[in-house]
Image (spheres, rainbow, N blue to C red):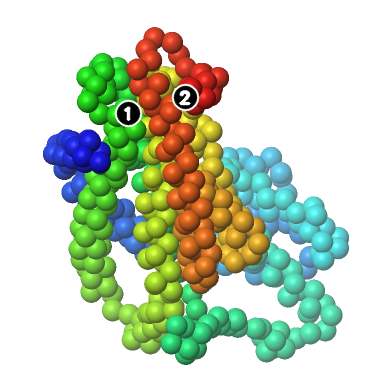
Amino acid sequence: MRSIWVVLKKEYLTRVKNRTFIVMTFLAPVLIALFYGGAIYFATVGAEDHSQKNVYFNAPHWELESDELSFETYTFLPALNSTSEMLQQIENGKASGWLQINDKDLRSLDSTELVGGSTFSVTELQKLNTHIKTRVHEYLLKQAGISESTLRLTEVSGGIKSLEIDQTGSIANSNTNLKSAVGFAMAMIIYMFIFIYGSMVMRSAMEEKTNRIVEVIVSSVRPFDLMLGKILGVALVGLTQFFAWIFLSILLLGGLTFAFSSGGNPVPAEAQNMPIHEFIEGFNTLPFTNIILVFVLFFLGGYLLYSSIFAAIGAAVNQETDVQQFMLPVSLPLVFGFIIAQSVVFQSPNGQLAQIFSMIPFTSPIVMAVRAPFDVPLSEIIASFVLLMVTFLFMVWLSAKIYRVGVLMYGKKPSWKDLWRWVRQS
């Protein structure tokens, strides 16, 4: 135990005193704040092109004047008699495009084409497509004898408002988007923490092996104690930096939020209070106990599991170019966890597939983090964490056998067959 503490202390103090660590501890929150500020600014200003766009229009089977189609920054002009002249105008930039509707049956726009001088963006195409289909729909209804005033009377506004029962038993606004964002943010932090600090453990083992320092160390420290000390020491380094980032980010983001909310054009109180009120109510319905519990348990559990594997890889290889063949199988479960989170958990966070993958130790740190805001039963959280820790202990035992042999092996590039032989050695 004393050997583990000595290695842990050495790994922690060496990295915490490093100039790069100190700089990044203070620089990362600044970068996050700049990213946050830039996102708010561009979301406010918008990236949409507001320049005037002239589009030639031709629809031989639709009785509609081109100027009746114009909307926002789009002006529709009658198509020219000469196709070559029209294309030349588009090529010269005097017009943005040419829209031609050749369909006889307007209920199915199969022969509608838009020719542009440059590629229209996805947003522009969607906007044009929606506008044209809306106008065609109105035209067909009028052809059927339905007046414009009747059309306006039948327009449907609003939508379904989502409510849920909060922890106090009261009904409050539900915010599924907020829950998804919180879950995905936690999963991303866990993913980054595992790879950034797991790689530190791997590089530390590689450096000591290539410098032959490990030969001196293992004469007084057992390989298992050395590996476990590295894992726990780097974990404390990560936690130190993480909590520093959280504290500094809260200060900077809080200041930016206040600056944006107090600056700019005044917004009517009715427009401000309602969304904020709904957001706060949705925020209050979040199961904070589950979220904090899942984040802490799977934040550490995921790191401990994967860092034990990283330590074994670092001890087995002789140079960084040899790492790639071992890193892909290790990283795939985490990446697969994100795929499951997007395709399964967001669609049915408490469904059968989501439950299965949150029980598999190699994907549970990601999947369970995404599920946490969606009221995951405490029994599932405990069962998943127990499985994660049992797998961690098994992987520590397995990795220690590889570490014990690999840390003193030089020259030969290791293969999967070599690792299996080292595991089998008593």
User: Measured along the vertical axis of the image, is residue 238 above or below residue 312?
Assistant: below
Image quarter for residue 254? bottom left
**Near-viewer residue (82 or 274):** 274
Return the disc, 2 or 1, that comes first in the chain's sequence. Answer: 1
**Mark 1: few, some, or many residues within 10 Å (few <14, many ≥20)?**
many
- Give the vertical position of 188 relative to 402 (above or below): below
Whether residue 59 appears in this view of the structure is yes
Spot occupied by residue 24 in the image (x, y as percentages of width and height) = 21, 43
Q: Is residue 75 visible?
A: no
Identified at 50% across, 36% down, the residue is: 330
Residue 294 in picture, x, y percent from top left: 42, 62
Residue 46 locus on image (x, y percent): 41, 60
Farthest front residue?
426
Give the alpha-carbon distance from disc 2 to disc 1, as whole Å: 14 Å
Residue type marked 1: Pro
Instruction: Name the residue located 45 percent from the left edge and 83 percent from the top edge.
Output: 167
- Classify residue 410 as left or right of residue 121: left
Residue position marked by numbered label 2 in the rendering: 426
Q: Secondary structure at mark 1?
A: helix
Residue at the (39%, 39%) spot, across then down: 307
Question: In the displayed structure, does residue 47 sit left or right of residue 100?
Answer: left
Query: Which quadrant is the N terminus positioned in?
Result: top left
Position of 140 compared to 35: left or right?
right
Q: Is residue 319 above or below residue 310?
A: above
Viewer-side residue, 376 vs 44: 376
Closer to the camera, 263 or 283? 283
Q: Could you say whether the residue bearing mark 2 is in a helix, strand or loop?
A: loop
Residue located beneath label 1 in the image:
223
Instruction: List x then y, in percent, for residue 225.
Output: 30, 35
